[in-house]
Amino acid sequence: MLQTLSIRNIILIDDLHIDFAAGLCVLTGETGAGKSILLDALGLALGERAEARLLKSGTTKAAVTATFSLSPLHALWQQLEDQGIPYAPGEVIFRRILDSEGKSKCFINDQVVSQALMRRLGQDLVEIHGQFDKLFHHKSQLIALDTYEKIEKSLVREAFKKYKEANQVLQTFQENSEKSFERQVFLRFAIEEIEKIKPQRGEEAILEAERSLIAHRAKIADTLLGVDQNLATIVTSLSQSHKALDRIQELLPEKIKPLIEATDRAIVEVQEVLEGMNSLKTEVEGTPRTLETLENRLHALNSLTRKYQTENLVSCLAEFKNEFTDLEQGENHFESLKATVFAAKNEYIERARVLSEKRKQGALKLQEAVAIELPPLKLEHAKFRIHFEELIEDAWSVSGMDRVEFYIQTNPGTPEGSLSTIASGGELSRLMLALKVVLVKSSTVPTLIFDEIESGTGGAVAAAMGERLKALAQNIQILAITHSPQIASYGTQHLVVVKAVKNEETTTHVIPLQNEEKHEEIARMLAGETITEEARAAAKRLIGNSDGYEPNSSQKII
């Protein structure tokens, strides 16, 4: 429950400390006294958006601190531990500091935290409800039903995620397939074009050498002929020299023999050169292709090399063929992906329909529970129904395929419709209270705040609402901001919000009321500015009735 709220420099509040009690705490005061400021300040402490307008005029810094006492079993303790936030058993402190630029710092147990974390954890501590309650929205109504019935949605959540992921893979593949079709057309043409000229590995180098040979055939032949003649003369001269040395070998055997051997080697090497030249001469004279043929072949190869930006047409052709084969096999992969999506979709539908059946069973229970709460709130002729509609596929989500909406028929013979379109302000307030009385059983939030929930009601109806608030407060702390004396009379704690003017400065104060003070405040609410004895007597009767009120077995919130 909310134990204390300390506020400093928020709008009209200078420095304020409020201690709250368990049960039903009512806050009253004249219009404009500053009751809404208390809600703004508490919202700030719970992580709501910070605005510079909240800062009291003439100040540079504001602070709000909210202290809560919680059961040892409350889920918040585990969340604090998960976030590494230190805590003492039983108590947690939320603090927010705001500066003149609208910037703020958030603290939980004096540890700096993000605004998002403060807001998320704060939602587990306080719920604030007014006439325009979030239960108007069908998404919130679905959450309320699931919470009431304690419905587990993890299987549907997993199935939906699996279905969406499979569908995304398929869509991506289809998008790529459109591009791959164009790629297939390109590859088919490229393969045919390259295969048509039948490139050979290393062919360009061979053709370049052959082209050079053909282009200079005459010059090479003339040169070879001249060299051949020269070498023939050399061989003749060497042979003659060999014979001359042989004739004098006996005279100087040791000197002449090495010379004869060197001459023999020279003759052999020159003859080898002659043989090589004869072979080259034959090759030059016997080249079958013309220069034009070679030029055309080289041009064809070089054109494709540039066109497909490769240095090796043979390797490029192999790569194109492999890619084309992979793309052709994509059709089979497409069918496989479609089968995966189909299976995932069916699994989701199956689980979502099981979830829907559980919801429908829970809806019957919720309808019955709300029906019990309506007569005490003077809505004995009203009928509460929960309507189901199966969503179209595009609207499916991790929460299933159901669109749930709360409907009300206020009187027999009148059409039923959604809460916001059928119920009047007073009827809506009572219906919201009935729903809260029922839903509180499944809520872990320890404090509920009702902001003028009695709007559009009065007299016996307001008294009935006070009774239900008191019954609700047996199990949870209730803070009721109200202008209704009937509701205020049921408060176990009564705080009055007042404005005071001092030195031309207006400030808001909160005063806890004791017995006689409470009587006077209820009388003021009944009579207005001038409190009469009749008003005091009426106030006494209201308080006496509320003090003597005890919920019967059908009214107690268990």
Image (cartoon, helix red, strand yellow):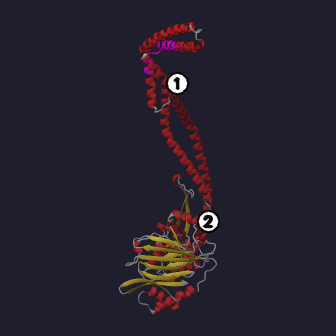
Q: Residue at x 53, y 43 (%)?
A: 173
Q: Tell me: residue 299, above or below residue 6.
A: above
x, y (%) of residue 206?
49, 22
Q: Nearer the viewer, residue 140 or 201?
A: 201
| Amino acid at pointer 1 | Gln
Residue 274 shown in magenta: yes
Residue 450 screen position, x and y as percent: 51, 75
Q: Quadrant of residue 558?
A: bottom right
Could you tell me residue 211's position as x and y percent?
A: 44, 20
The kind of secondary structure element at disc 2 is helix
Q: Amino acid at mark 2?
A: Glu
On screen, residue 316 versus residue 552, left or right, reads: left
Which one is nearer the viewer's eye here, 39 or 268?
268
Magenta span: chief secondary structure: helix
Circles 2 and 1, Cβ within 8 Å, touching? The answer is: no
Q: Say if 423 sits above or below 252 in the image.
A: below
Q: Quadrant of residue 262?
A: top right
Q: Callout 1 environment at 10 Å: few (<14), some (14 to 19), or many (20+)?
A: few
Marked residue nearer the N-terminal end (2 or 1): 2
Question: Which span of residues is magenta-colored?
Answer: 273-296
Q: Does residue 414 show up?
A: no
Where does the N terminus fall, quadrant-wise?
A: bottom right
Q: Which residue has dot 2 on it? A: 149
Residue 487: percent from the left, percent from the top? 51, 81
Q: Which residue is mark 1?
A: 200
SS for tag 1? loop
